[in-house]
Each structure stands twice: as C-alpha cells, then as structure tokens.
Image (tube, rainbow, N blue to C red):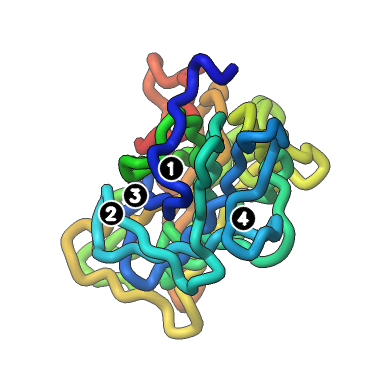
C-alpha cells in the first residue's frame, strides 16, 4: 500500500542497521546476517536489496561490544541499498551469519543434546529478528530473539565431595520420569522469520541434555559457578528434574530441581532465562 509508505528523498541510499538482544551480548568478532526485501517503484515485489543482488545474506559486524550495537557491512558487496520509489521494506536478521542462498521461512536451528561449556552458551544459539519499515533513512533497529530458553545452574565448588574443589567432566539435565515430559529438551527444527514461528522435528528430540567441560575438565574455583544450559521450551513434569554432575574420575552427585509444589506444570517459555 503506497499510502502507508514514505518515498525516499534520495536517488539511492545505503541502509544502516543496529542489533540488540535480551538473550546475548554482541561483540566485535561476531557476524550477523541480514536479508532485505522491498517493493520497487515500478511495483516489483520481494526485490532483493543487497548490493550484489543475490539471495545470500548481507554480512554485518558489530562496531563495538554490547547490546544494542551499531553494525557495519563486512564488504562493499554486503551493502543494503534503497532507491527512490522503493517501499514496503522488510528486514530479517540471523545470528550467527549463515553462508549461501537463504530462505527466511526455513532457517535451521537447534538445541544440541550435547553442549560444550568451554565454547559458551552464545555459541549454541541461533537468534532471529524481523522488521518492516516505511522509511530507511534512520538506522534500522533489529531486535534479535531466541525461541529457546536458558537455565542457569549454580553449582557448588565442592558438589562432588564436601570440602574438595571439583573438576567437572560433564553435567546432565534430565526429568526424573522421562515419560511425563511432553516436549523434548533438545531438538532440531526450522524457524519461519516471516511468521516468527519455530517448527521442531520431533523425530530428532531428546529428553536430556549433557554439558561437557573439555578433555582437561573444568575446575570450580568460586564458591558457586553459574553453568548455563540451552533448552527447548517445556512444561515441568511431575517429579521435576535431576542434575547429574560428574568429575574427571566419574564420581557423581545428583541434585533434584524444579521439585517445588508450584513448579509442577510450570512453563519454561521460549526466550526465558531461569
């Protein structure tokens, strides 16, 4: 609808972007992908605005650490350009950047059943953003969201043996009664950024998640260490969950969680940090 869109006062202008997220803090070493569409002045719909005209994403990098951050194009070919008469602007962002031709209605994402603590929770996540705009003169602010949840476990330094600092090998989060958990904790699937939906492939689902701490293990030095776990959204089943912590000698400690009366049936929603 041309009545709802503002014409540009320029023959051509480069579109600038910023990125923010409640899920992560961006850093200068990150790469963010943006796919941009518009309707042209002659009525051509779904026109690709990337400078090289391809359906690959524009590669953008943060100018600083934090959230929100301003972005800059990685190369001249990554510029997103708007021209006089263009309107009905639609911008889709994906973190991390993905190579090749891209379909914003089928973005692959997953919660891994095995997660590497040393790589950080951010490395496990795929974030998406979507925005429509009538005016591309201002910086386009993209808010990136996660369809998944993060549970932060505070693990005591001497969790395995009282008074002795632990060197962790792995940590497994699983329901006490697997049959009562309706949704998988780990799963693959695809996101439709146009509709902002995630469709899981239930055949890939797993009802436990293991965090690994590398070949040398991870020495707990603080009184309590926060260990984040990425999970698919779920409702807490009756009986709650068990957290099984193992040290490098395969000694174990088992801690129950989500066992309070008001935890039963509690929703751990997408984007939530617990």
Residue 97 in view of the camera: yes
Secondary structure of residue under mark 1: strand
Q: Distance between the residues labelled 2 and 3?
A: 5 Å
Q: Position of residue 159 (x, y in %)?
A: 31, 59
Q: Answer above or below: position of 29 versus 253.
A: below
Q: Where is residue 170 in the image (x, y as percent from the top left)?
A: 49, 65
Q: Are marks 2 and 3 in contact (CB under 8 Å)?
A: yes
* Disc 1 versus disc 4: nearer the observer: 1
Q: How far apart are marks 1 and 3 (CA)?
A: 10 Å
Q: Distance between the residues labelled 1 and 2?
A: 12 Å
Secondary structure of residue under mark 4: loop
User: What is the number of the mark on residue 112?
Assistant: 4
Check disc 1 and report the residue beneath it.
144
Q: Which residue is nearer to you in this view: 237 or 28? A: 28
Which of the two discs, 1 and 3, labels the residue nearer the N terminus?
A: 3
Check disc 2 and report the residue beneath it.
69
Q: Distance between the residues labelled 4 and 2?
A: 28 Å
Residue 172 in view of the camera: no
Q: Answer above or below: position of 70 versus 255.
A: below
Q: Place residue 156 in its image quadrant.
A: bottom left
* Disc 3 versus disc 4: nearer the observer: 3
Which of the two discs, 1 and 2, labels the residue nearer the N terminus?
A: 2
User: Which residue is pictured at 57% across the width and 46% down the height?
Assistant: 36
Which of the two discs, 3 and 4, labels the residue nearer the N terminus?
A: 3
């Amino acid at each position: 609808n041309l009545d709802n869109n503002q014409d540009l006062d320029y023959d051509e202008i480069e579109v600038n972007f910023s990125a923010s997220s409640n899920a992560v803090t961006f850093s200068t070493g990150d790469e963010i992908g943006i796919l941009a569409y518009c309707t042209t002045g002659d009525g051509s719909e779904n026109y690709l605005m990337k400078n090289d005209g391809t359906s690959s994403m524009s590669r953008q990098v943060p100018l600083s650490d934090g959230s929100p951050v301003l972005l800059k194009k990685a190369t001249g070919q990554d510029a997103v350009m708007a021209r006089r008469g263009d309107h009905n602007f639609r911008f889709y962002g994906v973190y991390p950047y993905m190579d090749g031709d891209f379909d914003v209605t089928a973005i692959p994402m997953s919660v891994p059943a095995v997660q590497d603590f040393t790589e950080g929770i951010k490395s496990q996540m795929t974030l998406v953003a979507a925005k429509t705009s009538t005016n591309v003169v201002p910086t386009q602010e993209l808010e990136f969201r996660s369809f998944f949840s993060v549970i932060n476990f505070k693990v005591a330094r001497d969790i395995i043996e009282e008074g002795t600092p632990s060197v962790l090998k792995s940590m497994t989060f699983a329901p006490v009664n697997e049959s009562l958990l309706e949704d998988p904790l780990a799963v693959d699937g695809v996101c439709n950024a146009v509709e902002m939906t995630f469709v899981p492939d239930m055949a890939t689902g797993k009802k436990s998640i293991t965090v690994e701490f590398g070949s040398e293990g991870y020495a707990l030095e603080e009184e309590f260490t926060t260990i984040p776990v990425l999970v698919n959204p779920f409702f807490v089943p009756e009986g709650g969950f068990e957290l099984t912590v193992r040290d490098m000698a395969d000694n174990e400690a088992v801690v129950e969680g989500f066992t309070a009366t008001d935890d039963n049936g509690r929703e751990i929603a997408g984007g939530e940090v617990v």
